[in-house]
Amino acid sequence: MGVMSAKLSSEPARVRPTVPLLSYQRQDVESAARFRWNCRARQTGKSFTKSLRRLLRGLIRRRNQVFLSAGERQCRELMDKARQHCQALQIDCQYHDCRFFDNLSIKQLEIVVPNRVRIIGLPANPQTARGYTGDVLLDEFAMHVEDRAVWAAMLPTLMRGDGEVDIASTPRGKSNLFYDLRSNPLFSISTMTLPQAIEQGLAVNIEEMRQAIGDEELYRQEFLCEFLDEATAFLTLDQIAACTDPTLHVHDRLAPLTDEPRELFAGVDIGRVRDLTVIWVFASIGPIGPIDAVAVVELSRAPFREQFQHLSQLLSLRNVRCCCIDAGGLGMQLAEQAVEQFGAHRVEPIVFTAALKSQLASALRIAVESRRIRIPADDRIRNDWHSLGRTVTEAGHFRLSAPRAEGSHADRFWAAALALHAVGAGTGGAESLATRPLQFARAGTW
């Protein structure tokens, strides 16, 4: 393991703080290349290395640094790493987390270091990429929803004052700008797979990673840095990215939904031991308005009693119009309990068949392609939705299947498909009952 030291004072007697780096990380941090393209496997310290590189380059060049991430969660994690580097290197810094863009629900995170150098963290958006002068880090660039628009917006900024740019990501197919830029002659190109990183000292059990992900195609993409063909994917990564909104705030609990003013529609895919139970909640204003994911609650190995408690908490909200529950096998009892307690007008049990699965999946795909729905920028959801494959049987019929990967069997996809079905089932006109005017007796205290 290599060790990089950062000099922070001219006093010769002072001990220089150090940050431990592996050889490939040190090479990246110390590179003087103006344009860097790095394809990095998961778990190789990509964000750790890039945030350190840009922090040090900013101090050396006395130039602001702009971090653009796929979503707000990823942006916050990247900025937290930059702040940890400041603490480890004993660099005085101030952290700000309270600035917003006008007319956009985008939060700006900021770290101010000596020489008035600012490190600005933002979810990637063509509007956020404009108006800044400084060096740029495009983190997980293959996952950016509007990658070409972001690139076009920020490139003029880089041209002023010899701006630097670091582009780092894991692969996501071939239909994106990250893949295209690897052949750009201006860039210094570097690829680091997980086996290569382990050879250079990374302490990771590669076989454990391979078994945990449980999908050879995903393993090749996420850890071997292969740009794979997506011909058999039911939803391509580009299609999923197109409906991803990095500014969308999605809760992993149901309690915050008490403040949601829109009508809610839920889908519940039931699991117990091998699969997750996923409660997916969409919010919508009307039948033609956008549909936003507002909550994705995942329960792993949760007892049915606990699962029903979550269902009851959800269905107790008055603005939940319809909830579709997987009622086949394990879900039968939970669906019956929910119907008995909350009524058949709000709870619809769904028993999966091959034909119905095809119908639900096709409806979700149409909503994705038309960009009617918006989902969060989340790797688990992206991989889960992309894991669903479409093959043709000998009889000429389409067959949908998904491997069990990362503890899921496309459970997030099917919960979202059920929630979208609930949107269609619960958007009918409100029922009313006409009665005669109330009459009161003349005698009495009135």
Image (tube, rainbow, N blue to C red):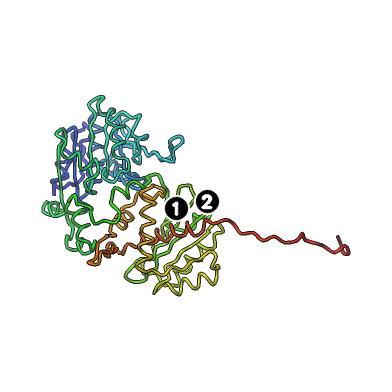
Which amino acid type is shown beneath numbered disc 1? Answer: Val
Left or right, 311 with respect to 72, comes to right
Q: Quadrant of residue 13?
A: top left
CB of mark 1 within 8 Å of CB of mark 2? yes
The single residue placed furthest to the right in the displayed view is 443
Q: Identify the mark nearer the N-term, 1 or 2.
A: 2
Residue at left 18%, top 55%?
220
| Residue nearest the viewer, comparing 435 with 11 | 435
Q: CA distance from mark 1 to mark 2?
A: 10 Å
For residue 116, above or below residue 145: above
Residue at left 23%, top 63%?
214
The spot of residue 236 in percent (x, y) is: 28, 52
| Residue nearest the viewer, comparing 75 with 172 | 172
Q: Quadrant of residue 33?
A: top left
The residue tagged 1 is 294
- The disc label shown at residue 143, or none: none
Quarter of the figure that contains the C terminus: bottom right
For residue 62, above or below residue 121: above
Disc 1 residue crowd, few under 14, some 14–19, many 20+, Cα 10 Å: many
The spot of residue 69 in percent (x, y) is: 31, 42
Q: Quadrant of residue 303?
A: bottom left
The single residue placed furthest to the top in the displayed view is 161
Disc 2 element: loop
- The disc label shown at residue 262, or none: 2
Which amino acid type is shown beneath numbered disc 2? Answer: Arg
Disc 1 element: strand
For residue 415, above or below residue 286: below
Disc 2 residue crowd, few under 14, some 14–19, many 20+, Cα 10 Å: some
Left or right, 393 with respect to 373, comes to left
Q: How many numbered discs, if any?
A: 2
| Residue nearest the viewer, comparing 69 with 200 | 69
The spot of residue 292 in percent (x, y) is: 44, 50
